[in-house]
Amino acid sequence: MMLALVLALMMAAAIFAVLWPLSRGRETVPAGAAGASDVAVYRDQLEEIDRDRHAGTIAGPEAKAAQIEVSRRLIAAAQSADTTGTADNVIDNRWRRRITALAALVIMPAGVAVMYLALGSPGLPGQALSGRMEAREQTSLPAMIARVEAHLEKNPEDGRGWEVVAPIYMRLGRYDDAVRADRNVLKYLGETSARLGDLGEALVSQANGIITDEAKTLFEKIVASDSADPRAQFYVGLAAEQDGRFSDAAKTWRALIAQAASDAPWVPAVREPLGRVDRANKQANGAPPSGATSGPNAEDVAAAAEMPAAERDRMVRGMVERLSARLHDDGSDVEGWLRLMRAHVVLGEKDKASAVAADARRAFKGAPDKLRQIDDGAKSFGLGG
């Protein structure tokens, strides 16, 4: 209804624009009178040109050309003077205005109506706003993802479909779905460095920034086959940092920056963690042990505790979780249990340190010497017997 009202107002405005000039009364100059006046003017001009030619103020060729032009106009004016008289011209002008007004009032609206009936859809019912919004939502990102997911549910071996939806899951923060999609991409399309890297990144995001063992293996595999892959090298360095191997991390990132183009956009993202591990190395007064399973020592954790909270959490949580996972798989490393307890104490997590001590005692239940080392370490950390 509102649309019809707007269209009607627009039509009325167009008609008014046509009729307004026609409705204004104006004096009509008789065609015959106008023609007679023009004839007299052109005759005077011919006489003036002739006088100027005799007086020498205008050259002969120019005078002749001017006489020809004025004569042409004189003939046209004389023919106009012989046309219909004053009354006939007035009547003719009135009828022209009437015909134009009739076309604006009747023919124009009728023509528009005929066109709408022929090309439009007058029988189509109006659609509410909610209906139009629902139709728009059908083309939204969630709707498109839902359609892709429905397709993949029916065609689970469509590797291209999984490859399309995987990065969308990552952008939306649906990391579990991204990991599943990337696994299917590898399964149905095969391995490439890019696809292995995508799965590795999804695993890291799924673990809240922790480089899991599986992700580390993937990135190391990429570097082994393509040592120039910057993404894989970055994550290999990050895994070394989270393992407490700050020197190895710094070495990896320095090599990555050295081989990068001067305008590589990711270089600042590498310089930031490089500065972080350099600070940790300086505060620890030397590089920590380089063994892949050594875990954080006291200096590592103390240095990390002085870092900004965001940097500390990402680095230390990775070191602690990886060491904890290793010790629960193989609990024979007394020094590893002590380092894990010390890490939780330095971070102010005495309850977790006590839980680690209890796990260590269970691991060394049949080994009195090792059990005594655990008890002594727990007492030195203020965890009791």
Image (cartoon, rainbow, N blue to C red):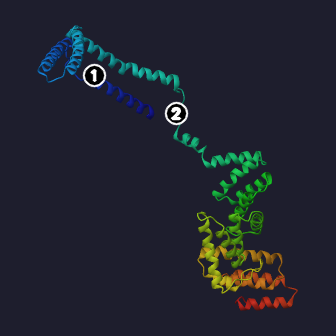
Residue 129 drawn above or below residue 213: above
Percent from the top left, x then y, of residue 231? Answer: 68, 64
Whether residue 133 is visible here, answered yes or no, is yes
Q: In the displayed structure, does residue 8 sit left or right of residue 50?
A: right
Q: Quadrant of the C terminus?
A: bottom right
* Local secondary structure at mark 1: helix
User: Which residue is at 72% across, 92% downward?
Assistant: 380
The crowd level at tag 1 (other Cα within 10 Å; few <14, some 14-19, many 20+) is some
**Residue type, mark 1 in image:** Leu
Q: Which residue is mark 2?
A: 126
Q: Earlier in the sequence, mark 1 or mark 2?
A: 1
In front: label 1 or label 2: 1
Percent from the top left, x then y, of residue 105? Answer: 36, 21
Whether residue 385 is visible here, answered yes or no, is no
Percent from the top left, x then y, of residue 334? Answer: 80, 85
Residue 218 drawn above or below residue 119: below
**Residue type, mark 2 in image:** Gly
Q: Quadrant of the N terminus?
A: top left
Q: In the displayed structure, does residue 282 sit left or right of residue 123?
A: right
Between the residue at mark 1 and the residue at mark 2, the CA separation in whole angstroms equals: 39 Å
Q: Which residue is mark 1?
A: 22
| Disc number placed over residue 230 in the picture, else none | none
The residue lying toward the viewer, choosing from 93 and 129, is: 93
Residue extending furthest toward the right: 366
The crowd level at tag 2 (other Cα within 10 Å; few <14, some 14-19, many 20+) is few
User: Residue 384's quadrant in the figure?
Assistant: bottom right
* Local secondary structure at mark 2: loop
Residue 48 drawn above or below residue 167: above
Percent from the top left, x then y, of residue 60? Answer: 19, 19
User: Which residue is at 69% across, 86% downward?
Assistant: 298
Q: In the displayed structure, does residue 150 sit left or right of residue 334?
A: left
Q: In the displayed structure, does residue 313 sit left or right of residue 340?
A: left
